[in-house]
Amino acid sequence: MSQIPSAIELHKASKTLTLKYGQTSYTLSAEFLRVHSPSAEVQGHGTPILQTGKLHVGLSGIEPAGNYAVKLCFDDGHDSGLFSWDYLYNLATRQEELWADYLAALAAAGKSRDPNETVVKLML
């Protein structure tokens, strides 16, 4: 059975999305949602594509997609991922672990969350 949120709140100013499941709520940043988009652009075809420079991305809108998902529209133009109820619940409940994995992948690749920053590794 799908975990369907009882409420979804888009907070454009704080660039967050709050999902409520009964008495429990989860707040996910637009950056977190953007780098974990279920779209082919992010997930690739078998191997996920590391998203970089998404620190300042925000959510510009949310649209229902049938009875099973929502389409999140990001202010960087990305809007091709359909976030199913199960996928959103997975992101919400595993947010800390998924975020740590993302930060580790960025560090390993020598990349940054900030689009205005370039990481340079010096070989001393």
Image (cartoon, rainbow, N blue to C red):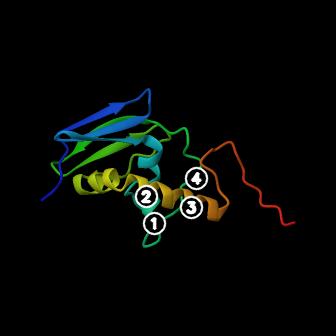
The answer to whether 95 is drawn above or below residue 104 in the figure is above
Q: Residue furthest front?
A: 23
Q: Residue furthest top?
A: 13
Read off the residue under disc 2: 98
Query: What residue sits 40% from the left and 54% below the top?
Result: 37
Residue type, numbered disc 4: Thr
Residue 25 spot, x, y in % from top left: 27, 40
Which comes sooner in the sequence, label 2 or label 1?
A: 1
Residue 88 spot, x, y in % from top left: 29, 51
Asked whether disc 3 touches disc 1, contact meaning CB atoms under 8 Å apart, the reply is no
How dense is the environment of label 1, judged by Cα within 10 Å: few (below 14), some, or many (20 and up)?
few
Read off the residue under disc 1: 44
Query: What residue sits 68% from the left and 42% below the top?
Result: 116
User: How far is mark 4 from mark 3, CA to CA?
Assistant: 12 Å
- Mark 2 against mark 1, which lies toward the viewer? 2
User: How far is mark 3 from mark 2, CA to CA?
Assistant: 10 Å
As helix, strand or loop, the secondary structure at mark 3 comes to helix
Residue 41 spot, x, y in % from top left: 46, 59
The image quadrant that residue 120 belongs to is: bottom right
Question: On residue 104, which mark appears?
Answer: 3
User: How far is mark 4 from mark 2, CA to CA?
Assistant: 15 Å
Residue type, numbered disc 3: Ala
Image side of residue 103 versus residue 36, left or right: right
How dense is the environment of label 4, judged by Cα within 10 Å: few (below 14), some, or many (20 and up)?
some
Query: What residue sits 41% from the left and 48% below the top?
Result: 33
Residue type, numbered disc 2: Leu
Which comes sooner in the sequence, label 4 or label 2?
A: 4
Read off the residue under disc 4: 52
